[in-house]
Image (cartoon, helix red, strand yellow):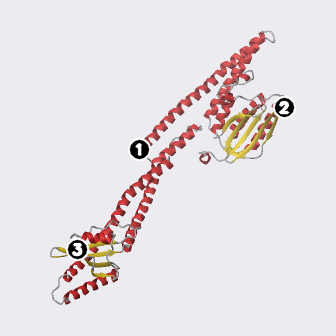
Amino acid sequence: MHTRLLPLLIVLMAAVLLALGVPLAVSLAGAEQQRVVVDRIDDTARFAALAQFVTEPTGPSGADINERRETLSSELRSYYTVYGIRAGVFYRNDSPMAHAPDDWYLPRTGEVRDAFEEALLSRRSHDPEQVWPWQRRSLVVASPVIRDGDVVAVVVTDSPTGQMRSRILRGWLVIAAGEAAAMLLAVGAALRLTGWVLKPVRVLDATTHDIATGRLKSRVAAAGGPPELRRLARSFNEMADNVESVLEQQRAFVADASHQLRNPLSALLLRIELLALELPEGNEEIASVQAEGKRLAQVLDDLLDLALAEHSEASLQVTDIGALAAERVAAWAPTADSKGVSLTGTCPATTAWADPVALSSALDAVIDNAVKFTPEGETVEVAVASNGGTSTVVVTDNGPGLTEEELARVGDRFWRSGRHQNIKGSGLGLSITRALLAAGGGSIAYGRHEPHGLRVTVTVPRNAPAGAAQGLTDR
């Protein structure tokens, strides 16, 4: 969620900054050009005032006119020399009154000609189009020289825009730097904001995972965030308390029922034994009743074991899985030999985090099933391996195996394959195994073993599960 929310906030903030920065950059460019245009208007107005005196002769010899024209030409040359701006005063017939540089004349077409024609209409030329930093254009401003209400000449300036474009570019760089700084601040604020908003969600997700994997006492710790998420965390804790209470009641009921039924069942079996003494030896009915009674006692014992397995907490520690598996293989070897089954183990030393007692019980249940369902003359193999963050104990047999539908149900409580109903068992052994492994962060999986048989994989973590290190420290 963090990786989806953060880019969205960044895109929105970038759009806002662009919406503010682009008009600001355009405004800056327009203001800079307007400043230059106003300056050129002032210059053309001054030159137009000088040109008016040139067009008004005061003597028959025209000496004053030549002197004034020379003054105007000197001003234009100085203007060009200092600022590099071409300027000239041209009569209506395009002939120059004065101009600088000397080789600059009115062109036949272009912006200069358009400005000149517009000034002939007794008004200053329109402001030039905006010049952007990447455009190598000039600014043309033209003002009419009016005498007795008529336009007798036009003052034209043709200004290079290099310095103006440089100033615009520098202003844009300043704006870009400000935008970048604002964006960095916005990203930092977005990180803090998303972290603040999503922290309760991450805590809730971790707690939900802990509860889903069997750590029912996990709760959402108090954290910051919006009031709605804090209220959600409190509601989640209340829900978890209620669920744990209901499950605890169910476990207590199963454990109490199993325990309370054992005494009357034991008394009933004793009475059946006494009754059997009064009947002829080998009576099939009494033998069947005794067998059913023993099976019921086994079911009650398994129910009690299951309730205890689901209720107890794992005592995790670093365990040599290879040595433990080899020990269980050795313990079950006599049983396998009595059935004519070969039980072999490949158990190299490898460590993992596990409850040794719970893992031993789980391996006993798995090896017991494998030996029980493997025909005489076949082999049961136990192999220990490690792969990255997990260690596995794989038990394979060459028995009849299970179908795909049966593999999907194996491990369910009281479930047994229809083909194995005549084999002793309650259908709770693998359920107890799964509960024991889940309490320590482990798991059990089932698959087919080719050409026939079942593969059972017991997996335990090599790294300390969440809360294990803290639990050891607390102890």
Q: Which residue is mark 2?
A: 337
Name the residue located 34 percent from the left edge and 66 percent from the top edge. 130
Q: Quadrant of residue 276?
A: top right
> For this rendering, which residue is in front, 88 or 348?
88
Observer able to see residue 253: yes
Q: Quadrant of residue 159?
A: bottom left
* Vertical relation: 46 (above or below) 379: below
Q: Residues within 10 Å of mark 3 (few under 14, many from 20)?
A: many
Rounded to the nearest angstrom, the CA distance separating label 2 from label 3 is 122 Å
Q: Find the residue positioned furthest to the front.
A: 93
Q: Is residue 174 left or right of residue 211?
A: left
Q: Residues within 10 Å of mark 1 (few under 14, many from 20)?
A: few
On residue 144, the disc is 3
Q: Is residue 90 left or right of residue 215?
A: left
Q: Which residue is mark 1?
A: 227
Amino acid type of disc 1?
Answer: Pro
Amino acid type of disc 3?
Answer: Pro
Helix, strand or loop status at disc 1:
helix
* Vertical relation: 135 (above or below) 212: below
Please provide percent x and percent y for residue 460.
67, 42
